[in-house]
Image (cartoon, coloured by chain):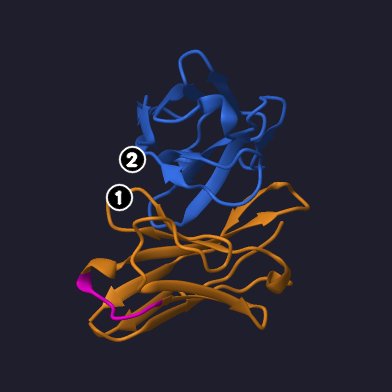
Amino acid sequence: SYVLTQPPSVSVAPGKTASITCGGNNLGSKSVHWYQQRPGQAPLLVIYYDGDRPSGIPERFSGSNSGNTPTLTISRVEAGDEADYYCQVWDDSSDHPVFGEGTKLTVL
Amino acid sequence: QVQLVESGGGLVKPGGSLRLSCAASGFTFSDHYMSWIRRAPGKGLEWVSYVSSSGYTIKYAKSVKGRFTISRDIAKSTLYLQMNSLRADDTAVYYCARGLERPTGWLDSWGQGTLVTVSS
């Protein structure tokens, strides 16, 4: 089945920019969505359709899908952004959602 | 606002059964496909099953096919997951989540989850 790869961890200082990538076969032709999961909390959709933000998600969160490497970018990182982040696509061949392995964002 | 509340988790022995429920409110339940997703300790998110808005399409992950059954009660706006022949590797927090009008795309609302522990 379809596999999405993510870096296990990313570290960033407060106020700086964090970038989390998502890898998979022919990802440039798919729509990629991103979720944030803080410790002990439910996952929260932060980006859908590669770069759209649901209402209530700060503009600091942005997404792109160019060059076949979807990327979640968090600008002006805050302590509260420390969480696990997952990319997700819909696998048309198996007809179900597929999640990436997850990236733990640590704010130094 | 959209609210999803899971219940039914607990401690069960290997080979046992458990039924999870997810009570939905704040939206028209029958207009959306609904999914179960789990997160095992130390692992990432894993999609488990979904039922389409029409109820005609049901899918399962290979890891649970033949053991788990998804269902829903439109009148009660409630989603269920019947879990049989449970194994230690089914131990996880189980989340229900709302999808779009048809099975594709993203999951825009999630419940807080219910913990299932399979252990003797």
A29 left or right of B9? right
| Chain letter of the residue beneath label 1 in the structure image | A
**Above or below — where is A7 with respect to B78?**
below
Q: Is residue A26 magenta?
A: no
**Above or below — where is A19 with respect to A87?**
below
Query: On the image, which quarter does residue A25 sit in?
Result: bottom right
- Three-letter residue code for mark 2: Gln
The quadrant of the picture occupied by the N terminus of chain B is top left
The quadrant of the picture occupied by the C terminus of chain B is top left
Are the residues under marks 2 and 1 on the same chain? no
Secondary structure character of the magenta stretch overall: loop
Residue B83 x %, y % = 52, 26
Query: On the image, which quarter does residue B71 sit in?
Result: top right
Q: Are marks 2 and 1 in contact (CB under 8 Å)?
A: yes
Residue designated by label 1: A41
Residue B18 x %, y % = 45, 23
Residue designated by label 2: B112
B55 left or right of B19? right
Residue at screen point 45% across, 30% down: B27
Task: Measure the alpha-carbon separation of dots 2 and 1.
Answer: 7 Å
Residue at screen point 43% across, 81% down: A19
User: Which portion, as a residue range, is magenta?
Assistant: A74-79
* Chain identifier, orange in the render: A
* Chain identifier, blue in the render: B
